[in-house]
Image (tube, rainbow, N blue to C red):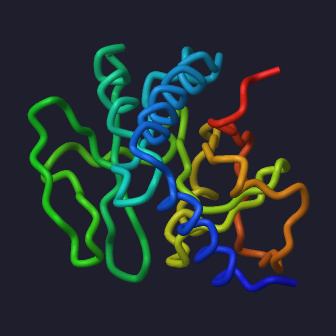
């Protein structure tokens, strides 16, 4: 068994090693593949994240969702490793959280049962939807509260056939993992 820490470090290195051209390609592919999903097309309220540093960029997807008149909600960190999602629009102002990520200021807090679609962040995934996140457990605590479709995106290097790490009872799976640097069959 490999530790989650080792896999996290490797996954971050794989993301950091990408060229700007590759990152742009993956960002465009994310929009193409995610917006083509029937669950996305039917979704009214989509929970996305503001990507950080080496994460796959979600910026274009956020803009497209707003253009498609979807209600877009982004996370805000709360005490005790909890989080909430709030609505954003083109005029939303962002504040940098002490952990470094941008969070929306203001906006309406949306309850988990209002959300139809969640793009779940993470560093490593299995084809079955097991995931390794960033280690805070925020999504593992929040995901059981929603019935939304849970989708993640990754690159081939960060996709495992089987988990090589230990799965905890608190680890939440996603419904679907989309590999962005592989053409769909």
Name the image quarter holding the N terminus.
bottom right
Quarter of the rendering containing residue 62? top left
In the displayed structure, 38 sits above or below 159; it is above
Instruction: Tell me: 157 left or right of 141.
Output: right
Residue at horizontal 30 percent and vertical 60 percent from the top: 76
Residue 52 lies, in percent from the top left, at 35, 58
Residue at horizontal 34 percent and vertical 47 percent from the top: 74
Residue 165 lies, in percent from the top left, at 81, 77
Residue at horizontal 40 percent and vertical 30 percent from the top: 61
Residue 114 lies, in percent from the top left, at 46, 37
Comparing 168 with 22, the one in front is: 22
Instruction: Tell me: 39 left or right of 19.
Output: right
Instruction: Tell me: 181 left or right of 54.
Output: right
Comparing 130 with 84, the one in front is: 130
Quarter of the rendering containing residue 87? top left
Residue at horizontal 71 percent and vertical 74 percent from the top: 170
């Amino acid at each position: 068994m490999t530790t989650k820490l080792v896999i996290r470090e490797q996954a971050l290195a794989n993301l950091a090693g990408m060229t700007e051209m590759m990152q742009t390609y993956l960002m465009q592919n994310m929009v193409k593949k995610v917006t083509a999903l029937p669950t996305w097309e039917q979704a009214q309220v989509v929970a996305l994240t503001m990507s950080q540093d080496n994460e796959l960029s979600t910026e274009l997807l956020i803009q497209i969702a707003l253009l498609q008149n979807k209600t877009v909600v982004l996370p805000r960190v709360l005490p005790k490793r909890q989080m909430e999602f709030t609505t954003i629009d083109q005029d939303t102002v962002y504040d940098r959280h002490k952990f470094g990520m941008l969070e929306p200021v203001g906006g309406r807090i949306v309850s988990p049962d209002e959300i139809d679609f969640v793009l779940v962040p993470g560093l490593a995934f299995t084809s079955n939807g097991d995931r390794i996140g960033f280690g805070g457990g925020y999504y593992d605590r929040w995901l059981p509260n929603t019935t939304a479709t849970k989708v993640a995106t990754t690159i081939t290097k960060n996709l495992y056939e089987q988990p090589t790490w230990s799965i905890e009872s608190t680890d939440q799976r996603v419904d679907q993992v989309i590999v962005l640097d592989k053409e769909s069959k």
